[in-house]
Amino acid sequence: MGYAKDRGLAGRAKSSNASRGSGRTWGNGSVGGVGGQLRDVPGLSAVLDLITGNGAALIVARTSDGGAFALTLLDGDARTKRYAHSQDELDGAFRELADLYADDPA
């Protein structure tokens, strides 16, 4: 699943506490396959800079069976998780995160 750059994404919440971030939520999605490699994600450090520069955090971990990455976005009061089972899904998840945060001033 994805989310639109126009910010019209379902399930998105705004935090009423400005010091706690914007409250963006991130779509849940999973499709079969095997996990990719973080070192192969284009622009990974730039995406992490965008996320953290806007006061949010991203937890990245492997699932217990090692078949996917579990990506948990923490932004304001919002906590959303997405699973990436392939390199394409992992790349896509980080592209969508970059789009989500790119137009916000740091």
Image (spheres, helix red, strand yellow):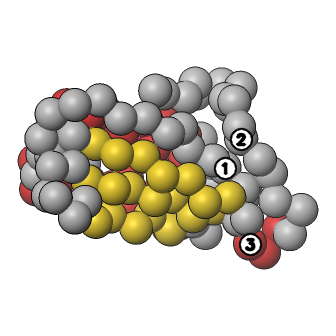
Residue 106 in sight here: no
Task: Say which label, 3 or 2, has the lower sequence index.
Answer: 2
User: What residue sits 66% from the left and 49% below the top?
Assistant: 24
Residue at label 2? 12
Other residues around mark 3 within 10 Å, as few (<14) / some (14–19) / many (≥20): some
Residue 49 quadrant: bottom left
* Mark 1: secondary structure: loop
> Residue beneath label 1, please?
24
- Residue 45's spot in the image, x, y percent? 28, 60
Type of amino acid at the residue the image marks with label 2 = Arg
Q: Which mark is residue 20?
A: 3
Residue at disc 2, secondary structure: loop
- Residue for point 58% across, 24% down: 4
Across and down, in percent, residue 16 comes to: 89, 62
Residue at 80 percent of width and 51 percent of height:
14
Q: CA distance from mark 3 to mark 2?
A: 15 Å
Q: Circles 2 and 1: CB distance less than 8 Å?
A: yes
Query: Residue 30 in the image: x percent, y percent?
Result: 35, 35
On screen, residue 103 versus residue 61, left or right, reads: right
Residue lying at 26% horizontally and 34% vertically, measured from the top left: 89
Residue farthest along the front direction in this orientation = 65
Image quadrant containing the C terminus: bottom right
Residue kind at label 1, given as amino acid type: Arg
Q: Determine whether label 3 and label 2 are within 8 Å by CB.
A: no
Q: Nearer the viewer, residue 8 or 102?
A: 8
